[in-house]
Image (cartoon, helix red, strand yellow):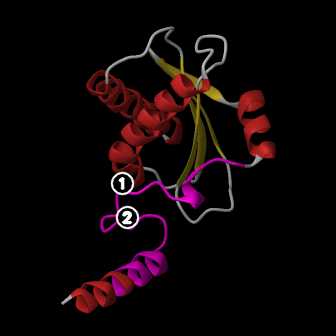
């Protein structure tokens, strides 16, 4: 039985890849290597030319640009050292942010046609609960979608 699941998943992946950016209905809820923003050139361009959306305690800087990934968006997460001195605390918050984005990224993938690059920064000075961060991430992503759709019109 497990081999049938494996074969079906391979077939679905090929279908999704061949269908292009728009066909992410069958996507898996993962945040893989290709979806993460790692390019220093893109990060530099992002902070020079990017537009900003804020939903406290989150801030998103984004630009519409071509990137090497086959996914419609690449995302980076940052937590300032000024607010959280211990790396353990910064890493925990980054992990929470990546998780909340991972669970809500389908909203972006379903609506966006062009490739985007964005960085999500944590602005608060204290650590928020996961449920609150999840709610704020939903708000941030819906605000991003409304701004992007307005820009396209």
Q: Is residue 101 left or right of residue 67?
A: left
- Asked if the magenta segment contains residue 21, the reply would be yes
Which of the 4 image quarters holds residue 29?
A: bottom left
Residue 124's place in the image compared with 152, above or below, is above
Contact between marks 1 and 2 (CB within 8 A): the answer is: yes
Q: Residues within 10 Å of mark 2 (few under 14, many from 20)?
A: some
Q: Is residue 34 visible?
A: yes
Q: Earlier in the sequence, mark 1 or mark 2?
A: 2
Question: Which label belongs to residue 110?
Answer: 1
Tag 2 secondary structure: loop
x, y percent for residue 110: 36, 54
Q: Residue at x 29, y 86 (%)?
A: 8
Quadrant including the N terminus: bottom left
Q: As rendered, which of 135 and 92 lies closer to the eye? A: 92
**Residue that extends furthest to the left in the rendered view of this protein:** 1
Q: Residue at x 44, y 77 (%)?
A: 19
Q: Residue at x 66, y 11 (%)?
A: 82
Q: Is residue 121 visible?
A: no
Disc 1 from disc 2: Cα separation:
7 Å
Q: Residue at x 79, y 36 (%)?
A: 44
- Asked if the magenta segment contains residue 17, the reply would be yes
Tag 1 secondary structure: helix
**Residue that extends furthest to the top in the rendered view of this protein:** 125
x, y percent for residue 31: 46, 54
Q: Which residues lie in the magenta part?
A: 11-38
Residue pointed to by mark 2: 24
Q: Is residue 153 left or right of residue 74?
A: left
x, y percent for residue 95: 47, 37
């Amino acid at each position: 039985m497990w081999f049938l699941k494996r074969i079906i998943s391979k077939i679905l992946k090929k279908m999704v890849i061949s269908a292009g950016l728009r066909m992410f209905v069958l996507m898996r809820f993962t945040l893989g290597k290709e979806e993460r923003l790692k390019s220093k050139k893109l990060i530099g361009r992002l902070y020079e030319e990017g537009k900003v959306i804020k939903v406290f305690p989150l801030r998103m800087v984004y630009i519409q640009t071509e990137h090497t990934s086959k996914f419609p968006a690449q995302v980076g997460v940052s937590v300032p050292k000024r607010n959280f001195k211990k790396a353990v605390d910064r890493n925990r918050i980054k992990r929470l942010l990546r998780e909340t984005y991972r669970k809500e990224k389908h909203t972006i993938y379903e609506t966006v046609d062009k490739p985007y690059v964005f960085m999500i920064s944590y602005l608060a000075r204290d650590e928020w609960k996961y449920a609150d961060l999840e709610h704020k991430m939903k708000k941030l992503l819906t605000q991003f979608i409304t701004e992007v759709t307005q820009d396209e019109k």
